[in-house]
Amino acid sequence: MTDTLTRSADSPAEIVQRADVGPDAALQSSVEDAAPVPRTRPRSGVSGSLIAGIGLVVLIALWVLAVRVLRVPPYILPAPEAVLKALWSGLAIDPASPKGYYLPLWSTLSNAATGFAIGSALGLLLGSLMAESRWVEKLLMPYAFALQSLPKVAIAPLVVIWFGFGDGSKIAIAALLSFFPVLINSFTGLRAAEPEKLDLMRSLSATRFETYRIVKLPNAAPFIFAGLDMAVVYALLGAIVAEFLGAQQGMGVVITQAQAVSDVAGVFAALVILGVLGIVLHSSVRRLEHRVVHWAHRGKR
Amino acid sequence: MATPQVSREGHAPRGRPLIDIQRVSKTYVTASSGSVHALNKVDLEIADGEFVCVVGPSGCGKSTLLRMLAGLDTYDGGTLSLDRQPVTGPSGKVGVVFQAANLLPWLTVRENVRLPLRVGGRHEAADARIDGLLDMAGLGDFGRRYPYELSGGMQQRAGICRALARDPQILLMDEPFGALDALTRERMNMELQRIWQANRKTILLITHSISEAIFLGDRVVVMSARPGRVLADLEVPIPRPRSFDTIVSHPRYAALASEIRGLLNAQETTPND
């Protein structure tokens, strides 16, 4: 979060401009702006995806080494090709087949997404109320932290009792887990608006809601996205934890079933899918953030 | 310069004061240093159409004075009125130009300039007015850019446009060019002089720069160290439009500059209470 704060600090002398703006644009002051800086800066070092790729190769090499040379038994660590085979059998299949990954994946994803939407919306709503009113803050903040300090895995059985073994409990736990990071981050971000910007709105006799919508909320956007980034992964986690406790379908069920028949490769395959899913969700949030909060990423594009 | 060569001399600025500050005092309480006596019986009258610059040592309360006029700060003694109405809070009579532009980075330049109209809910004829302001400030081609794509000088020009959006009678400027380099600053001073001559606003500008104050002001008000009070109120009898090339050779320039510098230096050596 400190990263976001330093990023938003203004450096007024910075000139970031395209060369195609001619001197006809400005009047006498064109000289002032006549130092165009190329927008695309040369990147130093290697790209992020290359580093990630190298990491993956090294990881798999170590894995192969462990299985082949150290002879780790397959019920502890299955060979990569066994996991690959399990993955393939679940993926290269009719999407409607109950044996494939598609149906459970869809079930888990849709529950996680619903829970994420509910939890984030509530987090933003309560975070906003707390940021706007000291009274609400004093009233709710202790409970928010009390809730956060409870181990969610311990509450999960309770939630299952309340919401049953259907989708309800999965959505509820996903929402519960997404709620807190969005709550705290939006609260922090909304309170972090610079006093000069609030003075500007006051000098214009802006209403409270105008100040919230025009200054505080956009100002909090980088914080809120940091919260959403965590929340989206937590929501997935929450949905799967709920499935472990009992469900008709879902990736959690796939893992429990594979475990029941000591299909360690099957467990690994499901974990690989969940890991990839986590990366995809995280990077989609980041991509969305870069689109929405473009001003905070200037010069980094 | 393509602007009309209007001389402000003989304008006789001593009409009814548009800004009327009488014996205004201010004491505020801080967590670290207890109560601070910021302003002590400040008297200042500014006529309609006048350009007044305020210089003073750091922390002399000149920014506080400006914030009071903008309705952002309270005062606890004396009277403060704009156009004969006491200041009770922010009003549409004033536009504020903040330090370092203070643009909203998530809005385009155009949206930033339009902000005062959007907030007031006044949308009528807004587009033409905003275009006119942007053109006047040489930002006509930059309306769709974001502030971070502009240089510091251009950002502050957008800040001035924003302050003018509601067409206020008074422009309050709090060290608007303090963050700019010296050359850009001179250029911005030229621009501001031109904008002022074209718009006929009453301007109160706070600055640390003596040359900026003399260049821009009809009058230069020198304030004392805390608690701030008016030490001197000096007329600048240099005809307009002024330029930095010629102003330094004007016979009154050097005398004024050294007088102001002398007043400010005397403040530095005076022990604070």
Image (tube, rainbow, N blue to C red):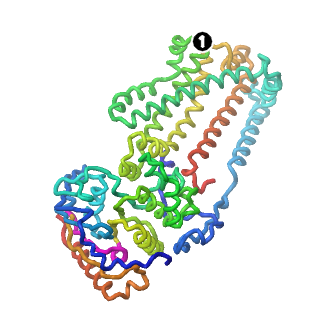
Foreground residue among A150 and A199: A199
Viewer can see residue A186: yes
Residue A219 in percent (x, y) is at: 47, 46
Quarter residue A107 falls in: top right
Q: Is residue B221 magenta?
A: yes
Viewer-side residue, B61 vs A66: B61
Q: Give left or right: position of B258 versus B142.
A: left
- Identify the residue at horizontal 59%, vertical 62% (top origin): B141
Height in image: B245 above or below B181?
A: below
Residue A16 in which image quadrant: bottom right
- Vertical arrangement, residue B83 with respect to residue A83, above or below: below
Q: Position of residue B216 (x, y in %)?
A: 36, 74
Q: Residues within 10 Å of mark 1 (few under 14, many from 20)?
A: some
Q: Chain of mark 1?
A: A
Residue A206 locus on image (x, y percent) = 39, 45
Left or right of B196 on screen, residue A244: right
Region in magenta:
B209-227
Q: Residue at x 42, y 44 (%)?
A: A211
Please tell me whether residue B142 is drawn above or below residue A234 in the rendered image: below
- In the rendered image, which quarter contains the C terminus of chain B? bottom left
Mark 1, residue position? A165
Give amino acid for label 1: Phe
- Quarter-wise, where is residue A229 in the image? top right
Does B45 sit above or below residue A175? below
Residue depicted at x 73% and y 44%: A53
Instruction: Please give the name of the residue rendered at 28% of the width and 82% of the height, measured from the top-left corner.
Output: B256
Position in image of residue B118 (x %, y %): 46, 48
SS at circle 1: loop
Residue A6 shows in this picture:
no
Left or right: where does residue B96 sit relative to residue A50? left
